[in-house]
Image: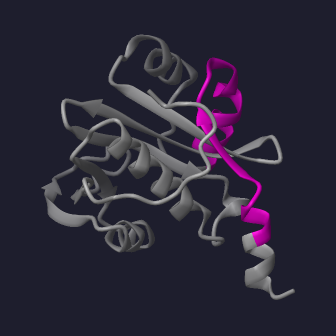
Amino acid sequence: MTEAESLREQGAGLVFRLMQLEDIPAILVIEREAFTMPWTEEAFRNELTHNHFAKYMVMELNGYIIGYAGMWAIVDEAHVTNIALLEAYRGRKWGERLLDELMQTAAYLGMNSITLEVRVSNEIAQNLYRKKGFRSAGTRKGYYSDNREDALIMWADLPDYVEPGNREGSVD
């Protein structure tokens, strides 16, 4: 079996489901590993319990949470709040699968477009977003409070976005 076939086989066990309060400790591990300014437990708890625009999902492999993504669904636009994968699982195109699932969910919920901010220095993420149809729409100067780095604003259209997913449960 080639390495690519092995990764595909491993990826077959990925499950996407709604994030729940009991998932927060595992999400915080991913947050601390992925971001210089990670969200707090309270921030996630508030998103899941008080923000009716918020939609969050986790990506599991063999029952372990290895990634998550979130967005706010407002009128007909999805605003990505965060998307992250444990470092040990990067480089397998699973972040792409997670983004696919988030975009498919946004389209399912009736969103016409999706937007996000990404650090101007994060070329790896920008390349993934461009691959998925995102285009640059400006910058937010000094957006990131840890180092005042600018954020690139990116948008993509969703109406034609249809890709089969491995959905367990509903995300609405």
Question: Is 22 colored magenta in this rendering?
Answer: yes
Q: Is residue 35 visible?
A: no
In the figure, 68 relative to 133: above or below?
above
Residue 153 is left or right of residue 83, and the answer is left
Report which quarter residue 156 is drawn in.
bottom left
**Residue nearest the observer in this picture, 63 or 110:** 110
Which residues are drawn in magenta? 9-33
Rendered view: 5 above or below 141: below
Q: Give residue 52's position: percent from left, percent from top.
A: 35, 17
Q: Is residue 160 magenta?
A: no
The part of the image, by quadrant, that contains residue 18 is top right
Q: Quadrant of the C terminus?
A: top left
Above or below, 8 against 21 in this view is below
State the residue at coordinates (54%, 50%). Answer: 84
Q: Give me the residue at 28% from left, 38% from top.
A: 110
Q: Quadrant of the N terminus?
A: bottom right
